[in-house]
Image: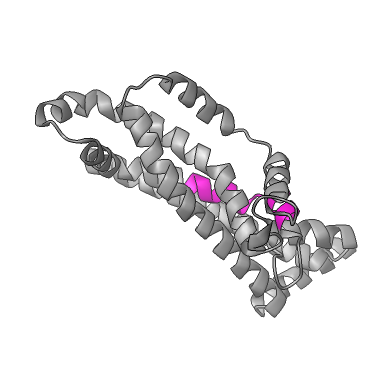
Amino acid sequence: MHEFAAAFATALRLIGTLDPDLVEIVGLSLRVSLSAVLAAALVGLPLGAALAAFRFPGRRVVVVALNAMMGLPPVVVGLVLYLLLSRSGPFGALGLLFTPTAMIAAQAVLITPIVAALTRQTVEDLLVEYDDLLRVLGTGPFHTIATLLMEARVSLATTVLAGFGRASAEVGAVMIVGGNIDHVTRVMTTAIALETSKGDLPLALGLGLILIVLSLAVNAAVSIIRDSARGSFV
């Protein structure tokens, strides 16, 4: 118990003094996760809206596949990307393996189906109200998608935040493609796993506390956005 208390106190000191190693790890984590969320939003939001708004052959198959991909095993995603980015892989010449770019790609692959599937459901619910109006106005495909995304922006903001929460907690895929290299690809989740295995509890606890605070902040933001949206319709 005494050892845990001492480790916890040291973790708080590391946070309070802005320990350089801790700040570097947190900064890289945020950069990787935010970049992955941006990439996922750019692909997932219009994809989900298009699947909700348009009917085409094979749409049901695409929707089922998209929903299934929400549960992609992170280690499998990491393994596939590792094979693609390794020297013998098709993209090996790019030299992206064991770089933050590879980690961003891994997180983006994992959260894009989540963003797209949740967007599809949100926009599909919205179409119950807007479908007839859009048909009467004769809006084109791009205008239709843009209109639906704009009208659903509050709900979609919570979707993007959910994607960020998923990305920031990822460890398996980023460990495989990033390699957990000190000062290069070490993020909060991989550092916690490594430092715990080494017995360096203060740094692991410090990073864990920051990760918990980050998760709470994301959930608080989701609640605030939802409450604001409800208030605007009262």
Closer-to-camera residue (229/27):
27
Q: In the rendered image, is residue 208 in sight?
A: no
- 26 part of magenta stretch: no
Q: Position of residue 106 (x, y in %)?
A: 62, 50
Q: In the rendered image, is residue 110 in sight?
A: yes
Q: Quadrant of residue 23?
A: bottom right
Closer-to-camera residue (55/170):
55
Q: Position of residue 157 (x, y in %)?
A: 39, 47
- Residue occupying the point 71% across, 62% down: 98
- Residue occupying the point 26% across, 44% down: 150
Q: Quadrant of residue 76?
A: top right
Q: Is residue 72 left or right of residue 4?
A: left
Q: Main secondary structure of the magenta part?
A: helix
Q: Is residue 9 left or right of residue 142?
A: right
Viewport quadrant of the N terminus: bottom right
Closer-to-camera residue (172/225):
172
Residue numbers of the magenta segment? 161-177
Closer-to-camera residue (187/234):
187
The outermost residue toward the left is 136
Residue 10, above or below 57: below
- Residue occupying the point 30% across, 29% down: 53
Viewport quadrant of the C terminus: top left
Q: Position of residue 119 (x, y in %)?
A: 40, 36
Residue 205, above or below 68: below
- Numbered-mark total: 0
Colour mode? one colour
Q: Position of residue 195 (x, y in %)?
A: 82, 63
Q: Is residue 144 left or right of residue 92?
A: left
- 171 part of magenta stretch: yes
- Residue occupying the point 73% across, 44% down: 79
